[in-house]
Amino acid sequence: MENRPGARPTGTKKSQKLKRPPTIKSMHLMALPLLVLLIKLVIMSNTPSFGWLGADGESYIGGVYGLVDQGYFSDKPSLSYWPAGYPIIIWLLTKITSTQAIWLLFFVQSAFFSAATYYFMKQVCKTKLASIHHLISIVLLFNPTLSLSSLVVGYESPIASCMLIIAGLILKSLILEEKSEILPQIIGVGFFSALATFMQPRWILTSTIIAVAWTLMQKSKKIQVFILVGVTGLMLIAPASLIQRNIESIGKAVVSTNLGVTMQLGAGPSTSGGYQHTGANVPCETQTHDVAPSDSQLVKCVLTWYLNNPLKLTPLIIKKSFFFWSPWSGPLSNGTSARNPWLNIAPTKAIAEGSVSGYNLVYGKMGKAISFTWVLVLLTLLFVGFFWLKSLGALYSNFAWIVFLPILVSWVVSIGTIGDNRFRIPTMPLSLFLQVAGFYAIQKKLFKKAPIKK
């Protein structure tokens, strides 16, 4: 029973493989995040426009111009097609400085990521995982794609930071001996869930599942109600505000209007399931044939097609899953991450562009084998880390679920829409954490004869 989200702490085992070290001082934990922030400031000062546009960067910037010209209820099409939350945040930054808003955006995103990493690691260091906190910090802060995404115009990095803080807040609540002190964590999780949902409304599903899982981990019915109502109530303020904005600006009670189009790209009799759609579209006829189907109608049409074509669904699930976990570069890369700053210095790209033989090496059988093996290794480490944490006792089992569920939800959402490796960036801190835990567990198993004890 202790290996499910609803497991309740039943005490800890006397023998533990990981020993809790003395309290680690905050300044010690803060040093690496601050160093990385300083490095990013140097990168910004040596980069045109201080950073890079993301996959939808032009659309977000266009939305900001609409907000600057027309105000909060601007009817700029990009503000309703894409969720308006992220452009609204940039627009608010223009109120501080209109000429250096992009610099301020990248600084805020970078500082937010460093602060979130610090807070997450501070909570981890209160557990028996403290002995590997250096390795976790280094992997989180120096992963090129994750860390450099804070210098990109896109929602991925801020949501990744929100997920770190949410996981840290819930871990703190699980450690608390006096559960009556849990209110600040409830408010914090609700606030950062709302912020993530404001930037990307599909986080409604992620936030709800996290709230339900956290609720099931509590003994007290009163606290269960506080968590469920508090977190979901605060979180739902974000999509409600976007709907209200769109009612005023375009006369439609919608959060955004691109879900159906995205789902349609990933469905069809002969498409691969990725962003590059091939073959015929899923049929979607309206009563008025000269009017294009609405976003909600497209969603219904795609879901109906999946139900009517179950044999085509399984291959698409496999392909989209692989695309979601695919490498950032190389022959098996698939997604909308062509503007990933890491690709500017990625060795595979340099080798492929250096010569014909280099291109053949990267995109030939050898490159495909290495890319496929890389994905299998990452997934293996992820699941080993998850199950290893679950084996350490109720506290760690509950935390393993809190970290794993957002990754799983993002994976499922990618299957329901398009297979895209960019979609995993918001939950990368959590997947990297589990992969480091998996690496540690395997390393202990291989190089020490004694088995890992609970």
Image (spheres, grey):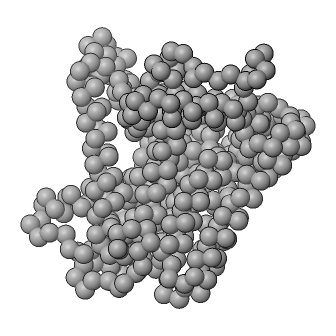
Q: Please report the residue visible at 40 percent of the width from the left and 81 percent of the height from the top.
A: 9
Residue at image location 36% in from the left, 57% down from the top: 434
- The residue depicted at 35 percent of the width and 85 percent of the height is 11
Task: For the C terminus, give its image quadrant.
Answer: bottom left
Residue reaching furthest to the top: 356
- Residue 358 visible to an observer of this rendering: no
Q: Looking at the picture, how far across and down is residue 6, in whole percent?
A: 44, 72
The residue closer to the viewer here, 39 or 218, is 218
Residue 38 image offset from top left, x and y in percent:
54, 52
- Residue 314, given in percent of the width and then of the height, sits at 39, 34
Residue 375 as seen in the image, left or right of residue 453:
right
Q: Kindly indicate the quadrant of the structure image that contains residue 299.
A: top right
Q: Position of residue 424 (x, y in %)?
A: 48, 43
Left or right placement of residue 52 versus residue 79 in this view: left
Q: Nearer the viewer, residue 452 or 147?
A: 452
Q: What residue sits 11% from the left and 70% below the top?
A: 450
Residue situated in front as seen by the camera: 397 or 288: 288
In the image, taking residue 346 as reference, residue 338 lies left or right, namely: right
Residue 246 figure quarter? top right
> Total number of numbered labels?
0
Quadrant (top left/top right/bottom left/bottom right) for the N terminus: bottom left
Question: In this picture, is 39 found above or below 169?
Answer: above
